Amino acid sequence: MPADFDMTMARAACHCQSVRLHLRFTNGLHTARRCDCSMCRMRGAVAVSVPLDGLTICEGRDALTLYQFGTHVAEHYFCRHCGIYTHHRRRSNPNEYGVNAACIEGVSPFDFPDVMVVDGRNHPQDGGGGIAGTLSYRPKR
């Protein structure tokens, strides 16, 4: 069953369930995107947006590991046990988190037929940005 793109709240967790989140969306899953910066290219996750006050860590705060690079503005969080990226505070908009869609209960990255890819290699904070393209998934049926 495909995800409800208009959801307003959801639960999320890492693979081993050590980190558990409660999410409150302002625009459901309609904010799904990927990025082509060095970090996101390697991570490969589809991220959806929640405001800073829309993410609550219910369990496992001590299991989260922070990774920062470059300008050290973005904050990338991973479970130190299973290694799964759960969420990050965005450099492009520090007032919101990007949440790994694959961690959201009932959601798969394959629920998104087309995902906008933002141009993170030419970051908006550095005078670039915009849309780099679209990543599409067409299931074989």
Image: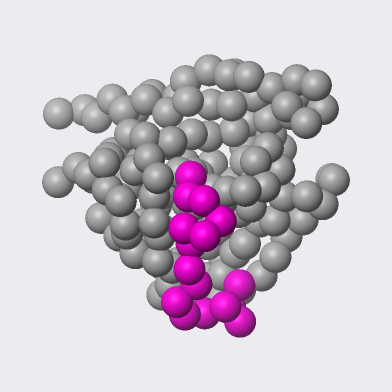
Q: Horizontally, is 87 left or right of 92 in the view?
A: left
Q: Picture coordinates of residue 117 (x, y %)?
A: 53, 26
Q: Looking at the figure, which quarter contains the C terminus?
A: top left
Viewer can see residue 3: yes
Q: Which residues are magenta?
A: 49-64
Q: Is residue 81 left or right of residue 68?
A: left
Is 116 rendered above or below residue 52? above
Is 8 displayed left or right of 2 in the figure?
right
User: Residue at the spot x=47%, y=20% of the render?
Assistant: 134
Up-down relation of residue 31 to residue 72 (above or below): above
* Magenta span includes 44: no
- Along the line of sight, which residue is nearer the eye, 2 or 4? 4
Across and down, in percent, residue 31 comes to 43, 36
Position in image of residue 46 (x %, y %): 46, 41
Left or right for 5, reference 20: left
Task: Name the residue at 14% across, 46% down.
Answer: 1
**Res 75 → quadrant:** bottom right
Residue lying farthest right? Answer: 71
Residue 120 picture location, percent across and down: 68, 30
Is 58 one of the magenta-colored residues? Answer: yes
For the point 53% across and 17% down, the residue is: 133
